[in-house]
Structure formats: C-alpha cells, structure tokens
C-alpha cells in the first residue's frame, strides 16, 4: 500500500517528488523518503519517520537543483515505522538505490543466503533484500538486466523504482501485483503508483503489466518481460482530470467529502437514466448486454466499505430483479473453490480499482469462465482495465482514508444496475419511473441532512469517554449498521460492531451495560415494529439508544435517548440517507477526541498488498 514515484527531467526533481508524494500519501503515511541526483551526478538521500510534511522539512537543506530521483511514502509491513526502515533502501555496497510497494514472501531465506555471502542489512524490511540481489547481478550500465535477474529469484508482489549510483539519469521500474504507471512528456519521464501523482509534464501514459519492467533514460523508454523479451505498450494521451484536491475551507477532507455527496450522487446517475421511461442506461455494460438475460446468479465481491455497498446491492438486485445474489469477501473468495460458470456474473467493487484481493478475485472468476464487470471510482485502474466492462461511479478524488462519498456512489451504481436488470425481467415502466423520481430527489434530501449536521455534532458529545458501541439495523439497513460501525472504528478508535437488530439477542446483548451507546437505524419499513422491540430490550438493560429514523416518526422519541430524522424516501434508496448521519457522527467523535480523521493510524486507503 506504499506510494512510489520517480522522475527524470529538467525541473527540480526534489520539488516534483515531494508534490507527487502528497498525491500518494493516501497509500501510507508511516514514513517517507527520497533519493535525488544533482546535476553533477551525486546522490543525496533523506528519509524520516512521519508524513510527507515531515520529509519536506527534513530535506529542506537540499537546496541544489536535482535532475532525477525516486521517492516513497510508506505503510509498514515488515519492520516498524522508523527512519531506518523508511525507503529508499540501498545495497550494502551503496551501488543500488530502490523503493518498493509490496511484500516479498521469500525474503527470509534470501536474506540468510545473502548474509552468508557477506551482505550487511541495516533495516528490518523485506525490501532491502531486493537491493542486495540487484547489486549482486549488477554490471555497470546494465541496470534493467540486473533487476530482471534479481526478480527471477523473488516470490511476492512488488512495484519497484530502482536507480544505480553510477547511472543517475536512469530509472528502472518493475511490476508484479502492485500498480505502476509511466508518464511521458516532452522534457520528462516519470513513474508512479497512481497517475494522479505524475508531474504536470506528463502528456502521455502507459501502464506496466505484471511481470514487466521499464527502462527510463535519456534515450526514452523501453519495456521488457522478466524473460528479457522486448514488449510493446499501448500509449494513451493523458488528460488530467480536474481534481479539487484542497479542503475548500473545510477543516478536514473527510468532512468536505461528506458534504460533496449531493453532487457526487448526481454525477453517478447523470446521463444514465431515462426518467420518462423508467430505464437505466449503463454504456459501460454494453459488452454484456446480450447476456444479461442469461445470468442465473450474481456474485459480488469486495473488501471493507465496498463490501458493505455490495450487501446493499444484494438487497437491491434480489428485491427489484429477482435474481439470486451472493456477496463474498474478496480476500476469502480468491482462496475458495467457488462454484461459478458461464451463467454466473461476478461484479467486483473497489474504490481505487487496485485492491489486491479484489483484483485476484476478478482474475479467478475470469479463469473459471464467469462474466465479470467492475464497479470502480479510479479511471485507468487495473480492475477497470482487466474487467473490460463495468460502471465508473464518478465520485471524484477521495483524499480521506475513510471512504464516504465513494460508498454512496457505489450504492447508486448498484441501484442503477438493479433497475436495468429489473426492467428486463419483472419491473413495469410505471414502477421504474417511480424509482427514478425517488433517485433524482436524493441530492435535495441529502442537503436537508447536511444542513442539520450540528444536530449530529451534539449527539456525538454523548460518546465522550465511551469505549464500546453497537450499531443495529434490519433488512437493507443492516449493511448501513456495518458501515457506521466501521467508520467509527476507523477514525475514532472506539470499538464498534454492526449487527442485524434481531441478532442482538444471540450474544451481543451480553455487552449492554448502563449508558453504553447503541445506534439503531430504524427507518420506517416492514419490520419497524420489531426494531422497536429490539430497542426496548436495550432500554431494559439501561443502554443508551441513538436512533436514525424517518421524518414524522415522532412516536419513537419515547423509546430512545437521542433521535435524528432523515427525509422520507423509498426503502430501496434509504441507505443513502441513513448512512450520512453515521458518517458525520464518526467524524465529529474523532475530532472531539483529537484524532485526524483523514489519516487514521495504521490505515491506508488503497490496500495493494495481501
């Protein structure tokens, strides 16, 4: 989950690299480092524990002009987050300098063998082993060949950028399981984990595939396979997306992104609906159009917040279209023996489009003959490219590690997909028209909730000093309870669990103690009275109940301690409205506890290692 960037060009490499690291910091922020070559070919390395801003301060003394370099922001896997373990790493003879995103699974036997041959290791990382291996094979001027020879001995995942002390104008990149994109400009070459991190000079791009290496130098670029066979890349124009990456006056990105949801919801359905006909039009699924009638089963696989969106999608597809759906953790799916065939559609959901487990699930499904489609936010991502078809959610850049607007956009994408299937099977045009009328009312209703954010801030105060919380929901609100609990854990570090409300009696009720917060998503639905019974069971044990319910439901006040009302909406779309108060609640609790909700401890936004 680390972020890497390399640059060769006529701008000051240090400035370019620091700016690139800022765009990559969502991938990890335990430590950071850089290596830059000055115009005379001398290398300078700076690395430190902490965030990119700490590296920027630490490297302020590097005031010369630098023509090339590599830089890294880390999410720790092997070894603690210390300056010694920060990247770049060098070989013990000092000839090779590299940065790495991934995990080398066989690093311990390699390390022992290299130590027996005289190598001296300084860090606890697996990465240092690669530097030693490359140095072992390196002959001056033949860096890409040395990298290829070294990687032939490596098992695991990697995205690498490698430099040699005697080749200051050369960067070699290599990929296996960790994303790398190459940027090409009139006066620069660059490489990064994410195309948003590429410098402004990058006008064209191409993506490395697994088992592929790239050599960047004064003569341009060339790519080879691990078997040292030249490869040809499809280069595309890079039209940089306009990303509003500043906080726009908000104290944190998380709050800004919560408040962006009226717009991002509209962006997800804009141009995709025919309100007068009750139809959803999803051009990204056109390759599957003729087969949609034939699918007997749908599997949705994802991780984390995207998995919660998938659970909402299960309710929507089964309720609207009547097609059986299973939701799988991608991290488990890849190691099972799933029963899938040509009549199975596998949907994979990932905000980044780079989630390692989800990508592996996609590849497994394709290998077994299933049709696959992706639901992603990041254009040009690996999942978007390998799925071949799918739905972009158009949530825009999400800087906060805790996902908010991407979740609601994923749910909208799943709703549109469910509606498209339903209109092909059992849903009438009148029903479709009614659903779309409800859909287009969402932005206004979300604004209603956001205009009352101070009510949620007041409720957040009751969590002062609390260390445990339960979130409960029934039916389509159960995934919302899971997502609310996850948000609270992620940013406030309060232990929270989400459950179907009726399951509370089967164990979790033992946790209820006086004044313990229990958040209940209690929108008006077919099982509302049963939810009230669950609330009474909590109250009988003196738990504190915070309810999210529908406007006009005044009767609930006598059953709960705190209540927040959402506008009336069809049950199928209600998760979009019920989740937003829970996002705000997690945010305000985190801020009250003095935590940074944008960069929670131990987390990274894009999980690209297993």
Image: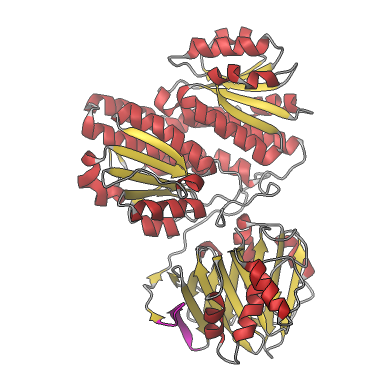
Does 469 sit left or right of 84 as displayed?
left
Image coordinates for residue 418, horizontal then vertical, percent: 33, 35
Picture residue at 34% right of the left edge, 56% below the top:
367
Does 59 sit left or right of 441 as displayed?
right
Magenta stretch encompasses residue 220: yes
Magenta segment range? 219-229
Quarter of the picture containing the C terminus is: bottom right
Q: Nearer the viewer, residue 124 or 381?
A: 124
Number of numbered tags placed on the structure image: 0
Q: Is residue 507 above or below residue 3?
A: above
Picture residue at 55% right of the left edge, 75% below the top:
153
Q: Is residue 42 above or below residue 256?
A: below
Q: Is residue 278 visible?
A: no
Picture residue at 68% right of the left edge, 85% below the top:
95
Q: Is residue 259 above or below residue 563?
A: below
Image coordinates for residue 30, horizontal then vertical, percent: 71, 57
Q: Nearer the viewer, residue 368 or 421?
A: 368
Q: Quadrant of residue 106?
A: bottom right
Image coordinates for residue 345, horizontal then vertical, percent: 32, 44
Picture residue at 36% right of the left edge, 72% below the top:
234
Quarter of the picture containing the N terminus is: bottom right
Q: Is residue 430 visible?
A: yes
Image coordinates for residue 544, horizontal then vertical, percent: 69, 17
Identify the residue at the far left of this view: 290
Does 426 sit left or right of 5 as displayed?
left
Q: Nearer the viewer, residue 78 or 492?
A: 78
Magenta stretch encompasses residue 214: no
């Amino acid at each position: 989950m680390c972020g890497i960037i390399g640059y060769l060009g006529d701008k000051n490499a240090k400035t370019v690299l620091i700016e690139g690291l800022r765009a990559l910091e969502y991938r990890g922020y335990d430590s950071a480092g850089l290596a830059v070559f000055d115009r005379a070919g001398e290398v300078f390395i700076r690395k430190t524990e902490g965030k990119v801003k700490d590296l920027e301060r630490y490297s302020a003394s590097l005031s010369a002009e630098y023509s090339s370099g590599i830089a890294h922001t880390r999410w720790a896997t092997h070894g603690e987050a210390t300056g010694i373990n920060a990247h770049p790493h060098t070989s013990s003879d000092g000839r090779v300098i590299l940065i790495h995103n991934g995990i080398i699974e066989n690093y311990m036997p390699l390390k022992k063998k290299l130590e027996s041959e005289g190598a001296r290791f300084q860090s606890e990382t697996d990465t240092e082993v690669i530097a030693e291996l490359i140095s072992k094979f390196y002959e001056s001027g033949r860096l890409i060949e040395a990298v290829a020879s070294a990687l032939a001995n490596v098992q695991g995942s990697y995205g690498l950028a490698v430099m040699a002390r005697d080749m200051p104008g050369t960067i070699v990149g290599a990929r296996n399981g960790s994303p790398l994109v190459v940027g090409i400009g009139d006066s620069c070459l660059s490489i990064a984990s994410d195309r948003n991190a590429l410098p402004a000079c990058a006008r064209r791009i191409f993506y490395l595939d697994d088992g592929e290496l790239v050599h960047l130098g004064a003569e341009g670029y060339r790519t080879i396979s691990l078997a040292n066979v030249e490869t040809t890349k499809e280069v595309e124009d890079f039209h940089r997306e306009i990303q509003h990456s500043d906080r726009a006056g908000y104290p944190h990105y998380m709050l800004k992104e919560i408040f962006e949801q009226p717009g991002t919801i509209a962006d997800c359905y804009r141009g995709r609906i025919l309100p007068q006909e009750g139809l959803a039009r999803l051009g990204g699924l056109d390759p599957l159009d003729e087969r949609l009638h034939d699918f007997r089963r749908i599997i949705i696989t994802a991780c984390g917040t995207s998995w919660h969106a998938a659970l909402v999608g299960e309710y929507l597809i089964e309720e609207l279209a009547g097609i059986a759906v299973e939701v799988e953790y991608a991290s488990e799916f890849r190691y099972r023996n799933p029963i899938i065939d040509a009549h199975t559609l596998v949907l994979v959901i990932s905000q980044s489009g780079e989630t390692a487990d989800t990508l592996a699930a996609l590849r497994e499904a394709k290998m077994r003959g299933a049709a696959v489609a992706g639901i992603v936010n990041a254009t040009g991502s690996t999942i978007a490219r390998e799925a071949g078809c799918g739905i972009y959610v158009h949530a825009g850049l999400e800087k906060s590690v805790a996902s908010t607007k991407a979740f609601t956009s994923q749910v909208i994408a799943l709703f549109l997909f469910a509606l498209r299937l339903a209109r092909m099977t059992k849903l009438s045009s009148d029903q479709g028209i009614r659903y779309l009328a409800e859909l287009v009312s969402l932005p206004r209703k979300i604004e209603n909730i956001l205009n009352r954010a101070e009510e949620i801030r007041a409720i957040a105060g009751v969590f002062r000093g609390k260390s445990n919380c339960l979130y409960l929901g029934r039916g389509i609100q159960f995934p919302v309870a899971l997502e609310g609990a996850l948000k609270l854990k992620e940013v406030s570090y309060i232990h929270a669990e989400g459950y179907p409300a009726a399951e509370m009696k089967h164990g979790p009720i033992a946790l209820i103690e006086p004044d313990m917060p229990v958040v209940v998503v209690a929108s008006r639905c077919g099982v509302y009275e049963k939810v009230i019974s669950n609330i009474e069971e909590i109250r009988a044990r003196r738990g504190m109940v915070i309810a999210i319910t529908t406007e006009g439901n005044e009767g609930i006040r006598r059953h709960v301690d705190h209540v927040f009302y959402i506008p009336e909406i069809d049950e199928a779309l209600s998760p979009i409205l019920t989740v937003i108060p829970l996002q705000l609640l997690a945010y305000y609790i985190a801020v009250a506890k003095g935590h940074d909700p944008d960069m929670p401890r131990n987390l990274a936004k894009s999980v690209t290692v297993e």
